[in-house]
Amino acid sequence: MSRSKEFDVNEVLDKAMILFWEQGYEKTSMSDLVTHMGIHRRSLYDTFGDKHSLFLQAITRYMGKVQANLTSEIKPSQTATEALYAIFQFMVTDQEDLPSGCLLVNSVTELAARDAEVNAKSIESFKGTEDMLEQIILWGQQDGEFTTKQSAKELAEYLHTVSIGIRVMGRSSVDKAKLLHIVDVSIDLLKS
């Protein structure tokens, strides 16, 4: 007869996600995870599998949370420009109680070159972000806010690259005002 779990799976997964985000994959040991998650080693293995499986589950959870947060930043009453500013504002400042940077971007720079599963997750996430940006840019192009000299797809790829750079810079002590200025310049470049 199996015992019922004495913990909330999503709650402890969130704890693992934060630890991986703070320390990175390589630096995080199983002992660190057990301590930080507040569960027994056996429960960790039974519920999440090995460290790599847990890491992939943490990335998936992170991707879902970020997508939900970014989507919630877009309001029907906004202009496309306002929607882009809201998304970038979220990326730069609205996560001050969380580790710096972006778990996914951090993981890509640490592991994607040698971990096919992390690479695949990053490509999936990056495509989702680019698709969202492309839809906003199309909206802005249709309303005359943004240039049509480049396709919405090209401009989305450009803005996504800027967003990755901002999240990498966010890992350092770069002033948030500088990052917000980069956002201003980037969005101004889209104007028609």
Image (cartoon, helix red, strand yellow):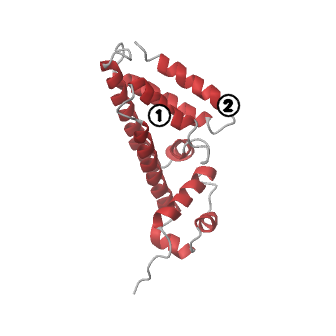
The disc label shown at residue 65, or none: none
Which residue is depicted at the point 50% across and 61% down?
A: 13
Q: Nearer the viewer, residue 187 or 149?
A: 187
Residue 120 vs 4, above or below: the answer is above
Is residue 41 visible to us here?
yes
x and y, in percent, of residue 119 in the image: 45, 45
Is residue 25 visible to us here?
no
x and y, in percent, of residue 80 in the image: 39, 25
Query: Cβ–Cβ below 8 Å for labels 2 and 1?
Result: no
x and y, in percent, of residue 27 in the image: 64, 55
Image quadrant assignment for residue 96: top right
Q: Nearer the viewer, residue 172 or 86?
A: 86
Q: Nearer the viewer, residue 81 or 165?
A: 81
x and y, in percent, of residue 11 in the image: 51, 63
Q: What residue occupies the far right of the structure in this picture?
A: 173
Q: Please identify the quadrant where the C terminus is shown.
A: top left
Question: How far is disc 2 from disc 1 in space, using C-alphas?
Answer: 18 Å
Which residue is depicted at the point 44% across and 82% down?
A: 3
Residue 170 vs 22, above or below: the answer is above
Residue 108 vs 18, above or below: the answer is above
Q: Nearer the viewer, residue 137 or 165?
A: 137
- Name the residue that disc number 1 marks: 87
Instruction: Classify residue 186 as left or right of residue 155.
Output: right
Chain-order first, disc 2 or disc 1: 1
Indicate the amino acid at tag 2.
Asp
Indicate the amino acid at tag 1.
Ile
Q: What residue occupies the far front of the structure in this picture?
A: 77
The disc label shown at residue 175, or none: 2
